[in-house]
Image (cartoon, helix red, strand yellow):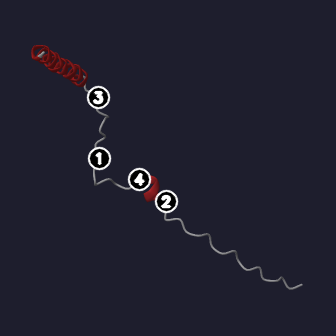
Amino acid sequence: MTAKRNTQRIEETAEQPVIRMGNIQQAVKPEPPPPVLPPPPPELPPLPHCSQQPAPQPPPPPPRQTPVPQ
């Protein structure tokens, strides 16, 4: 009985490397990493449309309508 148990244990241990090999084969194919965008240089001039246009200012209040003397 001990011999059969030993053979069963050997078969179980023999199956483990096969499963590991399957995992290794799947891991051997690495997925392509996402394209890493280079960080923008710190010394970037302000955008032209931002530098040309002045800061938005609130519209001037409407002129008071003085009553026209009749």
Circle 1 packing at 10 Å, graded few (<14), some (14-19), many (20+), is: few
Looking at this view, is 47 or 5 the one in front? 5
Q: Which circle marks residue 10 in the picture?
A: none
> CB of mark 4 within 8 Å of CB of mark 3?
no
The answer to which image quadrant residue 30 occupies is top left
Q: Which circle marks residue 53 in the picture?
A: 2
Whether 49 is drawn above or below 62: the answer is above
Residue on which disc 3 sits: 32
Estimate the spatial distance between the alpha carbons at disc 2 and disc 1, rounded to whole Å.
27 Å
Q: Is residue 63 left or right of residue 18?
A: right
Q: Earlier in the sequence, mark 4 or mark 1?
A: 1
- SS for tag 2? loop
Q: Nearer the viewer, mark 4 or mark 1?
A: 1
Looking at this view, is 33 or 9 the one in front? 9
Whether 60 is drawn above or below 6: the answer is below
The answer to which image quadrant residue 6 occupies is top left
Q: Nearer the viewer, mark 4 or mark 3?
A: 3
Q: Nearer the viewer, mark 2 or mark 3?
A: 3
Estimate the spatial distance between the alpha carbons at disc 3 and disc 1, rounded to whole Å.
20 Å
Amino acid carrying mark 2 in the image: Gln
Q: Earlier in the sequence, mark 4 or mark 3?
A: 3
Q: Earlier in the sequence, mark 4 or mark 2?
A: 4
Circle 4 packing at 10 Å, graded few (<14), some (14-19), many (20+), is: few
Whether 21 is drawn above or below 47: the answer is above
Amino acid carrying mark 1 in the image: Pro
Q: Earlier in the sequence, mark 2 or mark 3?
A: 3
Whether 60 is drawn above or below 16: the answer is below
Residue on which disc 4 sits: 47
**Percent of width and height locating residue 26:** 25, 22
